[in-house]
Image (tube, rainbow, N blue to C red):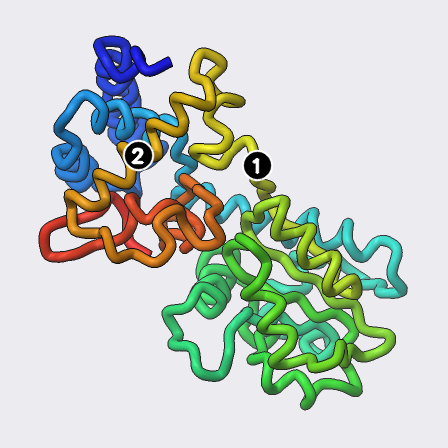
């Protein structure tokens, strides 16, 4: 349905842009800089580009600081306790209360929260960043936190290991992490291992379950294939068919070329996941780089 690139698409773009500005000014998306969004939309000039911009913004899932705090709380209050219901782990209090105690006593040796990171990664990587969010936003005591290469120091006492991250895309990065720190599936008997990202793609979750069945996964949000920007377009917009999605891909690639992003390796996001997902603290690399890739001539809507 290529006529959507005409007046109908422009009207759609204008309505979505108005709605986006309302979300920002109302405070629901207060962590987004309105001027940055306005500046970003100026790069979209032709009718086709404006239609692309409107669809991108309409598909955007943005998690503000407050919403991210709610995702963190959901993992601690519900997801992890539900994942451990069938295990032999028992606590004399709620997990949230235990993790936020000022003086946790022996519990700090029983539970370890581990950021997904390698020993060569900088502290700006998502794992350590999420660890700081757990501490700052919901008050998790840092005495429960541990680096993955130091877990062996607690082998005699730890009963629950929670790996934290902000996002599962393909699942490859987490499996590489396991290979680095748990070669040949070297997990301790009697210890529960949970991977608790804030958000996750269903395909990535399935990939990890298949290759690391010992790990339980509990995310706050699950993204399914119909939410992928291009391949899920006809599922989200019944009036737009697959042919329109193919044409929109070409508009997208031509736009990347125009703004100097032709040499990008993963033009459709890491693993070609085509996501339109962002947090106030950063954007997953599986999200379309049109949202976050930058150069001297192009300032994106969000940062990585």
Quarter that holds the N terminus = top left
Quarter that holds the C terminus = bottom left
Sooner in the amino-acid sequence: mark 2 or mark 1: 1
Q: Residues within 10 Å of mark 1 (few under 14, many from 20)?
A: some
Q: Residue 274: percent from the left, percent from the top?
A: 44, 42
Q: Residue 294: percent from the left, percent from the top?
A: 21, 54
Which residue in the protein does label 1 denote?
225
User: Which one is nearer the viewer's eye here, 256 or 86?
Assistant: 256
Element carrying mark 1: helix
The residue furthest bottom is 153
Which quadrant holds residue 15? top left
Element carrying mark 2: helix
Disc number for residue 86: none
Q: Residues within 10 Å of mark 2 (few under 14, many from 20)?
A: few
Question: Of discs 2 and 1, which sits in the foreground?
Answer: 2
Which residue in the protein does label 2 denote?
250
């Amino acid at each position: 349905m290529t006529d959507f690139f005409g007046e109908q698409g422009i009207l759609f773009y204008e309505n979505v842009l108005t709605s986006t500005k309302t979300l920002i000014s109302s405070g629901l998306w207060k962590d987004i800089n309105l001027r940055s969004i306005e500046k970003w939309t100026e790069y979209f000039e032709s009718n086709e580009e404006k239609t692309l911009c409107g669809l991108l913004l309409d598909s955007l899932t943005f998690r503000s600081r407050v919403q991210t705090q709610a995702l963190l709380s959901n993992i601690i209050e519900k997801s992890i306790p539900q994942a451990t219901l069938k295990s032999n782990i028992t606590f004399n209090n709620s997990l949230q209360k235990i993790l936020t105690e000022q003086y946790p006593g022996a519990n700090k040796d029983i539970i370890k929260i581990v950021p997904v990171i390698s020993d060569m990664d900088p502290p700006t990587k998502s794992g350590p960043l999420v660890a700081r969010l757990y501490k700052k936003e919901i008050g998790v005591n840092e005495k429960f936190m541990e680096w993955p290469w130091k877990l062996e120091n607690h082998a005699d006492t730890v009963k629950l290991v929670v790996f934290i991250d902000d996002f599962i895309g393909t699942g490859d990065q987490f499996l590489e992490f396991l290979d680095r720190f748990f070669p040949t599936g070297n997990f301790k008997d009697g210890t529960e291992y949970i991977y608790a990202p804030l958000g996750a793609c269903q395909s990535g979750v399935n990939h990890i379950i298949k290759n690391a069945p010992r790990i339980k996964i509990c995310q706050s949000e699950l993204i399914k294939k119909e939410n992928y920007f291009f391949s899920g377009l006809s599922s989200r917009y019944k009036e737009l068919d697959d042919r329109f999605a193919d044409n929109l891909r070409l508009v997208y690639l031509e736009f990347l070329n125009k703004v100097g992003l032709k040499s990008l390796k993963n033009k459709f996001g890491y693993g070609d996941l085509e996501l339109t997902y962002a947090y106030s603290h950063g954007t997953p690399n599986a999200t379309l780089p049109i949202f976050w890739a930058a150069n001297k001539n192009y300032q994106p809507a969000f940062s990585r």
